[in-house]
Image: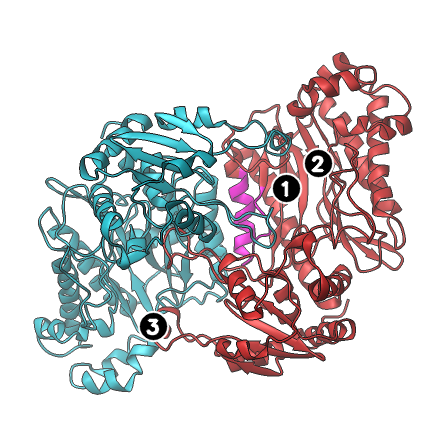
Chain colours: A cyan, B red
């Protein structure tokens, strides 16, 4: 992959947008939000759609694009800001960095909003400004229509097929995330709490001048799917599940999960279930190529997991029947993955416009409803593959589930696997013309290799 | 200091509030803010005033206090949240933890807002809800009036004198911050960038299940006072300035700055200036006790720095004359410190209501205008002491400044100190009945001790 210059790459994006959308397009970056008082700002994160076309984060700015040209609107910092923040680049310099065709103070944007399409920014003060300047309500998520819906579809098309500029960033995020996971594994033997392993992992991300793409999950309770506390003590018999990903300064994400034994060595029951999840992971990736439906990959993971659980005696019946009745979802209740790019769930601010092919909607099925992506794969698409096995009390103790699946689960056999609360193995998979490239492949998945990194 | 139970401590605060404010008081916590899409939440930080009386962070909650009683308003998570977030405590359990007298769903708050005083919450969606429920505009900062101003003054009185419950938390934040700084010093010899040292420091804070109380400053350009980039490479002749503080899970902050030599050994010029800043730091702390005006402490720091710079031949004249004409502020342009508590600049959301004694306002003087605290010290108050020396281009190259101070600066002598860009030494000082207790005293300030931690 040849490195692409920022300006050249951005201009290609703007030209492609112009081919798809005739109207002017205005995108806002948003502003830094105060934490406990206005001057104590949370680290600023520009809107992803802004970042895609502007390339770099600029606090409180907007870009207006038309016919492939980009106008940047932002205010220069007041002169006294130099004392506190040093020499900061002025509007013209930033415009030159990103290849803007013209630059203006923000106030001039109000003259140029006629007939413009936009996408709602998440940060609420800017969102109100956006509605005020466009003199209309700007809809969120699945409620987009007209001009804005047309723009959203065009942006989805662009952002779904990563260009060389995006891939440079995504590879950097992946490489640093791999290092963070290795540091977490290495820190385990000296750690007594989840927080200590998290500190080792996020410390690596910060040391590379990146931030976390999402709130890390670092827990011995992997069965709590979005566990965001870190206060549990580590016990030697625990598995630790770490779902941690870095984000580059320009906003591009990685998303990796590994599960390892706190003691360094998996127990035989832990290893049995880990190997099933790993088989699902490997077989999914082996099947992926342009044209394959992502839902088929999800169902493949479900089938491999069902088959493995039948082999272990936890489930009873034919794997394909178990998947057809969602019995696999008792232990694998989430989707096999999602789009990845500037957002960890890429373009999820647009609801299912990005994740679901037009005409498709979420399934009512227990085993399919949480699937975030239901489109045919295409070259340049980056998705996660993240099968898992969990013993979620809210599912396995639910009387309706227990009644429905009474005959297909061997509950006594399951009880023998009590030292497995949650396992997930997640990698970032780029679809290429010839198949796939796993951007996170430098991080081992095999039991023996993971054990070697922990011990 | 005897440990105090959470409920007992919180009830004392509520009783003291009731003695000062007859009206009902409603305080909102705020909500977690989405980052690039709604489900990707930034780590939630509850409003500091809410935390003071509720004790723990609760996303999207309100407390109503009257006559020392507290009613908690919050919604239970929907049942399906258990799948993703595990068993989370319900309203009644949280009420029991914080000693609430009654608990209600949020919707019931609208029945109980009559004549209530409040303080504006920073997070904007909740702020709008706050105005809507109270059916009035809620003013920010220095524009408070009537009921809300009376409440703010009562809260300032309480929060300015830390009780045992607060001190337990503040000591924890201080202890972890001390460890973080030691880790930063120890990491220096293996680091090549600012970001790597930041990673080592923040990694320690995360490992203790805390977060940063503010955006860290970790830089070889200490002259940029609020430098929040970390991309510079370290050079052996650089000084590194690290202003990093932890915040406990319940929101209490520490704020420490140390400056050390990247090589481990200060040069003679670096040491000369460091010793001046340290003398200011030490002499300020030695003078502090209840009843002493904080502005006098600031002026003492200015005087010690002026005297030291005269001794080095950088400034010319009598120290007291130099301070009277603000010549010291060419090199020490900020205030000597600020209140510290739940906010790193405690209660700065109230403008100068907390920091400035009634009837006092900010000075127009270059050497005093940035002072954030202008009140007599009192027992239980926690303040930072953070003198510094900087060569800020925006000041030293300013033609007006150069003209005004032409005769009192020996510019040739100053040029010999080119390897000093910025030095700051900051500790957290608790005022006690008998004088002071430095909560961050476990972190050395002396050159030899700092060198030993780096080498």
- Please give the label number shown on residue B243: 1
The chain ID associated with circle 3 is B
- Cβ–Cβ under 8 Å for marks 2 and 1: yes
Q: Earlier in the sequence, mark 1 or mark 3?
A: 3
Q: Is residue A206 visible?
A: yes
Quick check: do tags 2 and 3 share a chain? yes
- Inspect the magenta stretch and tell me whether residue B208 lies in it: yes
Residue at 17% in and 74% down: A326
Left or right, residue B180 beside residue A2? right
Instruction: Report x, y in % for residue A89.
Output: 50, 27
Name the residue nearer the viewer: A41 or A453: A41
| Residue A411, image x, y percentages | 24, 83
Q: CA distance from mark 2 to mark 3?
A: 49 Å
Q: Could you say which quadrant of the image residue B119 lies in?
A: bottom right
Q: Which of A170 and B370 lies nearest the eye of the viewer?
A: B370
- Looking at the picture, tell me which residue is in the foreground, A136 or B276: A136
Which element carries disc 1, helix, strand or loop?
Answer: strand
The alpha-carbon separation of the residues under discs 2 and 1 comes to: 9 Å
Percent x, y for residue B434?
Answer: 89, 57
The residue tagged 2 is B424
Tally of numbered tags:
3
Q: Earlier in the sequence, mark 2 or mark 1?
A: 1
Q: Is residue A252 visible?
A: no
């Amino acid at each position: 992959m040849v490195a692409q210059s920022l300006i050249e790459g951005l201009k290609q994006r703007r030209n492609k947008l112009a081919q798809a959308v005739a109207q002017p397009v205005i995108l806002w970056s948003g502003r830094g939000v105060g934490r406990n008082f206005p001057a104590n700002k949370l680290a600023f994160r520009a809107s992803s759609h802004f970042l895609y076309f502007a390339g770099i984060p600029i606090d409180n700015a907007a870009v207006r694009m038309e016919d492939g040209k980009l106008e940047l609107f932002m205010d220069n910092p007041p002169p006294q800001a130099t004392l506190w923040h040093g020499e900061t680049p002025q509007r013209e310099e930033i415009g030159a960095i990103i290849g803007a065709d013209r630059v203006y103070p923000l106030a001039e944007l109000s003259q140029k909003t006629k007939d413009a399409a936009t996408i709602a920014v998440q940060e609420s003060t800017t969102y109100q400004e956006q509605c005020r300047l466009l003199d209309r309500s700007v809809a969120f998520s699945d409620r987009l229509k007209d001009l804005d819906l047309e723009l959203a579809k065009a942006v989805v098309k662009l952002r779904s097929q990563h260009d060389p500029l995006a891939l440079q960033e995504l590879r950097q995020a992946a490489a640093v995330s791999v290092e963070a996971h290795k540091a977490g594994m290495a820190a385990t033997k000296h750690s007594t709490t989840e927080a200590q392993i998290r500190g080792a992992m996020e410390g690596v991300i910060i040391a590379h001048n990146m931030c976390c793409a999402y709130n890390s999950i670092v827990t011995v309770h992997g069965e709590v799917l979005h566990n965001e506390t870190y206060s549990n003590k580590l016990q030697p018999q625990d598995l630790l599940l770490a779902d941690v990903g870095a984000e580059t300064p320009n906003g591009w994400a990685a998303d990796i999960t590994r599960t390892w034994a706190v003691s360094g060595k998996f127990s035989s029951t832990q290893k049995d279930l880990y190997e099933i999840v790993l088989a699902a992971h490997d077989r999914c990736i082996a099947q992926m190529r342009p044209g394959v439906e992502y839902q088929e990959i999800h169902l493949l993971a479900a089938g491999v997991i069902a088959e493995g659980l039948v082999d272990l005696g936890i489930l009873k019946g034919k794997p394909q029947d178990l998947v057809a009745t969602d019995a696999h979802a008792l232990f694998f209740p989430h989707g096999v993955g999602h789009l990845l790019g500037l957002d960890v769930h890429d373009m999820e601010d647009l609801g299912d416009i990005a994740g679901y092919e037009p005409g498709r909607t979420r399934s009512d099925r227990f085993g399919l409803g949480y699937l975030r992506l239901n489109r045919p794969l295409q070259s340049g698409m980056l998705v996660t593959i993240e099968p898992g096995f969990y013993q979620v009390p809210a599912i396995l103790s639910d009387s309706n589930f227990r009644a429905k699946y009474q005959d297909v689960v061997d509950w006594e056999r399951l009880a023998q696997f009590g030292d497995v609360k949650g396992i997930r193995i997640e990698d970032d998979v780029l679809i290429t013309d010839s198949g796939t490239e796993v951007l996170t492949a430098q991080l081992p998945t095999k039991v023996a290799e993971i054990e070697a990194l922990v011990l």
